[in-house]
Image (cartoon, rainbow, N blue to C red):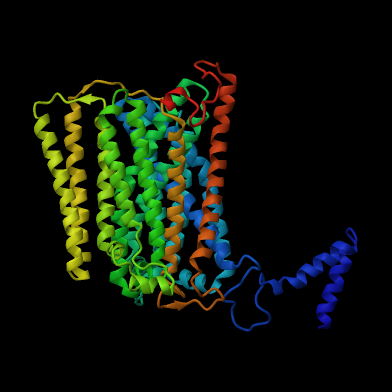
Amino acid sequence: MQQGVGTIERALRAVGGHGGWLPGLLLIAGWLALPSIGLAAEGATTGPTEYRDIPYIGSRNLIWIVAQLHLLLAGFVLGVPIFAWLCEVVAWRGGEKRYDKLAKEFTKLLTSAYSTTALFGGILLFLLVAFYPKLMNYLTDIFFPSFLLYCLLFLLETATLYLYWYGWDAMQEGNKKTLHIFLGFLLNFFALFIMIVPNAWATFQSSPVVISDGTAIERAWAATWNPTWWPINIHRLIANVVLGGYICGAYAGIRYLSSRNTEEREHYDWMGYVGNFIGVFGLLALPFAGYWLMREIYQYNQQMGITLMGGFLSWLFIIQAMLIGVLFLGSNYYFWLGITYRIPGSESKYRKPMLWMLVSLLLCLAVWMTPHSLVASIEEAQKMGGAHHPLLGVLGVMSAKMTVSNLMILITFMSFVMYWRAGKQDTAGWATFGKAVMGSVLVLASIAVIVLGVWGYFVPAIVRINYFSTSQVLIVIFVILTITPLTALLLKSAKTTTEMVWGSMPPRAGYALVLNAVMVILLMTLMGYARSSSRVHWHVYGVMRDSSPYAYSPALGSASLIMAFCTFSFCMIVAFIFWVATMGDKAKAGHGAAKGELPHGIPAMAGGSPDERR
């Protein structure tokens, strides 16, 4: 005790000699209070510290927010290089310079986001080591070789990204362009492994395997190859493409709304179309990857699957259905606006099909959002005869939801095909036969999906999950793989009757692109919480129990607040990245000529332009 008092006196004298006693007293008070607020080890314990906490916020909430922001930023950073590189390859092979310009603009967003992603990753690592040292010590003991590999991959990706971006203008001719294309390939190669290596750490927590004795590399490999590792790899790869596409679409939408001349409007209108196109085609495949992931979770541990789909987390999938439904509606709406405004004369031809597609999407969404068990009072449950509604209860099970989700994918795919064919007239001799084949494939596939969905009510669950649901997925994939090449062959010799008019979209098209991006962000925060909460009170499911004060699953209301905060924070970070990325463009525009300026500089908002009111 006397030694402690002596230490305090020496500290006071030292600080007092450099600017007064008040700062010294504050410093000592803070030093004494530090252990009491949980930022230091707990008292004078003899054993190692297992958990630390932070007041008011809570260690789990802080790590939750930082980890979610890091994952969203990482998804954007890993998804954008894929289609940026593909756009550059298209420009290189086809000679269309606008694709090269688009690829460069995508990469400009990437460079602005890369350092922010790394920053949040470093913060997350420090917080995990500080607040959950026991868990991190356990994971480090298992995955130490992959930690070293991850550091090497991160260094390689950073160097490749700098060469790819800063060498863009210098590598535009001959062999230098080939080298630049190769650098883009390496960037995506390293990014892929940067994604799948940490996926092993996260999936091991949900589906750990028995680790046999062996070398450090053998133990790390055994833990990496767990049942949900590859489903998560595929699911996150597609989700990153969807996130990157829709965020780039939102960037284009915002730039379109603030464009000051015709050239900018045309460019960002086209960029918004490409971003929406990438997001939609990723979205078509994403439910299939999600179904595979859930199937592997059920096979690994049935109780975990029941917790997700039938327990307290099941209501998250009702919210998920609403978000995905809005995303499908927003994407289709953007296609329909494109038909109406970009392709003159097509509105009257496609108005009825668009109406029927809208009605079908709304009906499918209504079925998908129908819960199996209703939140009802005792009196309401007695009147219904139970927790399940006598009429709508049959729509709340997976057989109905799998059916309508596949139908929504088919409708969205046909919206794109309709947009693709608009303004063109078939001239091939086999056009009538080809369209009849495509129509038959679409009708028969839709009927088959509905029949399997209804039949699923009368077979055991194992038959429905292993055979019927899988067959529905394969049927939809068959439709996409059949109609896409046939349409491309027909349009190869088709006559263009109406040229595409870029820059004529109404302002609400830009709003739709922003809405789609927000829905994707909300969706990823929602499902990230669902996957983590499926472990309930385990750090590593069935292996390391959570003995901290936060060993419980937060209520859905509390979780929704955190998810909403993460979404808002990420949108603010992305807005900052957009602002940084456009600073140079604004400076160039200020020194350039005002060629082709719009009448009032900034286009009118929704409802303000004559074209939009017609």
Q: Quadrant of the C terminus?
A: top left
> Would residue 171 be visible to someone looking at this image?
no
Q: Relative to 354, is 596 above or below?
A: above
Quarter of the figure with residue 143: bottom left
- Compare residues 358 and 317 and report the one nearer the observer: 358
Q: Position of residue 272 (x, y in %)?
A: 41, 34
Q: Relative to 115, is 525 above or below?
A: below
Q: Position of residue 76 (x, y in %)?
A: 45, 47
- Compare residues 117 and 307 and report the one nearer the observer: 307
Indicate left or right for 453 with 153 as reference: left
Indicate left or right for 548 with 270 as reference: right
Residue drawn at x 14%, y 44% is 441
Q: Position of residue 163 (x, y in %)?
A: 46, 38
Q: Position of residue 603 (x, y in %)?
A: 51, 26
Q: Quadrant of the N terminus?
A: bottom right
Residue drawn at x 53%, y 41% is 112
Indicate left or right for 64 with 86 as reference: right
Quarter of the figure with residue 350: top left
- Compare residues 512 and 173 and report the one nearer the observer: 512
Residue drawn at x 53%, y 74% is 134
> Would residue 345 be visible to someone looking at this image?
yes
- Compare residues 450 and 435 and report the one nearer the observer: 450
Q: Relative to 11, is 109 above or below?
A: above
